[in-house]
Image (cartoon, rainbow, N blue to C red):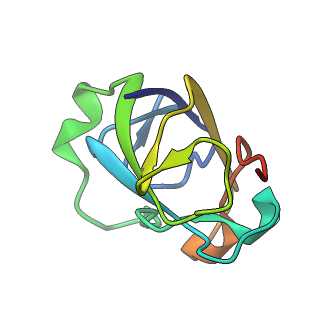
Amino acid sequence: MADLKCAVKNCMYNSSDCCCKGDIMVGGMRACDCEETCCESFREEREGSASNACKERPSKTISIDCEAVKCMYNTNYKCHAEHVDIRGNGACDCKETACATFRER
C-alpha cells in the first residue's frame, strides 16, 4: 500500500488530497514518462451528482494497480512506491490526470 496524495480535487473520490475509493488503477501500458499515465479510477464530481458517502473516511494509504509496466515501481501490475502523487486538478476525463511518481526503468 502506498501513501497517496491526490491533487485532483474535482474527482468524486478526493477528500482532503486523499482517495476514498480504497484502490485505484493507474493506466499507461506504453508509458515512458508520467504524462503518458493516468488515473483510470478518476470520476469527475459534478454539481448535482450524488455525493460520495466515503468522503468522511479518506485514507492516506491505498492499494494501486498499475498498467505502466515500464515504471520502476511496478511489479506484477502493482505499485510498490512508498509515496504516489496523482495530478490533474480540473480534469474532465481520466486522460487529463497523471501519476507524477512514474519513473521509467
Task: Identify which residue is drawn at 26% across, 41% down.
Answer: 22
Residue 63 in the image: above or below residue 41:
above
Q: Where is residue 77 in the image (x, y as percent from the top left)?
A: 42, 57
Nearer to me, 56 or 65:
65
Q: Quadrant of the N terminus?
A: top left
Residue 12 visible: no
The quarter holding residue 57 reads top left
- Whole-percent x, y for residue 21 in the image: 28, 46
How far across and down, in percent of the image, does residue 18 sit?
45, 31
Q: Left or right? Give the position of 19 relative to 51.
A: right
Q: Is residue 26 positioned above or below 56 on the image? A: below
Compared with residue 5, is residue 95 higher up or lower down, i.e. above or below? below
Horizontal side of residue 53 vs 40, given as left or right: left
Between 89 and 50, the one lying in front of the other is 89
Task: Name the residue furthest left.
Answer: 53
Q: At 32% across and 27% down in the image, what residue appears?
A: 58
List x then y, in percent, for residue 31.
72, 70
Residue 52 visible? The answer is: yes
Image quadrant in which you'd find residue 76: bottom left
